[in-house]
Image (cartoon, rainbow, N blue to C red):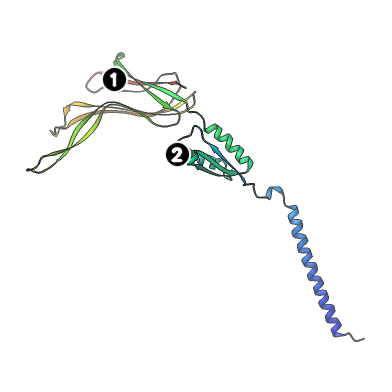
Amino acid sequence: MKLNPVRMGRRAITSVLSMIVLAIAFCAFTQSATAHAQSPESKPADEGTYQTIPLTYVTGKQDAFDVVTDLRNMLPHAKTYFVESQNAISIRGSADNIQAAQKILADIDRPRKVYRLTYSLTELDGDKPVSVQKVSLIALDSGDRVTLKQGGKLPIITGTTGGDNSAHNSQVQYIDTGLTIEATVEGSADALRLRTKIEQSSVADQRAASGVADPTFRQTVLDGITTLVPGKPLVLGSLDIPGTTHREEVSVVSELVH
């Protein structure tokens, strides 16, 4: 029996079309099954929650930027900004991120403790006190520097202007003399990290060896970092007083004001 070529061609075309339809249906079924089998963890995080949290005790711009840096480090998946016009933190992220940010800010944005630092500069002749000078500073536990200066300014002529036929104008520079204390405090009520720089300067009796009329200065500097327990005095250092048998001892004690 002879086969009809036209009929055979139609059967081949029908077979090919059937296979194409089956392939398309299989692909659609596979994609649908994959979508339904996707775990909840693979879904993108919810980033639609937005909140602005005002700052109460953090008022400096640099301090606010430090807070933003801390939040970005601890909550890397959230978007955090400082809104200067409102002195507030703007955060966009998941509900968990918002809740965590509120807890962090509650710990960071708090009232600063105020301490009174009392420095004692005791002049000793051997072990016998000759005189005591006390100086007090008020400092916050924020790490901001507080400075006290006690003394005067000594004018030093650094140059002159003008020719033979004109008046001479002197260029004068003023040098601080006396006592300067710089202090920064950080930490808690149990232990404070104290950075102190104490500088004493005065005019010496002798003149410079070159014979210049400018005075010679005597200067002593004490610079260091220590841990201070509130209420307990701590000796920071001791130094000899030039030209005498005396020495000066420097101590400090802190007191919580509020």
Instruction: Quarter of the image for the N terminus: give it.
Output: bottom right
Residue 42's tag is none
Say left or right for 153 vs 145.
left
Residue 50, given in percent of the width and then of the height, sits at 59, 43
Q: How many marks?
A: 2
Disc 2, SS: helix
Say left or right for 215 vs 32.
left
Question: Residue 92: which quarter of the image?
Answer: top right
From the viewer's side, name the closer residue of 79 and 253.
Answer: 79
The amino acid on which the numbered mark 1 sits, given as a three-letter code, is Arg
Q: Residue at x 48, y 41 (%)?
A: 85
Residue linked to disc 1: 247
Residue 16, given in percent of the width and then of the height, sits at 80, 74
The amino acid on which the numbered mark 2 sits, given as a three-letter code, is Lys
Disc 1, SS: strand
Residue projecting furthest to the left: 165
Mark pair 1, 2: CA separation: 44 Å
From the viewer's side, name the closer residue of 73 and 168.
Answer: 168
Residue 189, given in percent of the width and then of the height, sits at 49, 24
Q: Badge 2: few (under 14), some or many (20 or more) residues near its Cα, within 10 Å?
A: few
Say left or right for 86 vs 20.
left
Residue projecting furthest to the bottom: 2
Q: Badge 1: few (under 14), some or many (20 or more) residues near its Cα, within 10 Å?
A: some
Vertical side of 51 occupied by 196: above or below: above
- Mark 1 or mark 2: whose residue is earlier in sequence: 2
Residue linked to disc 2: 61
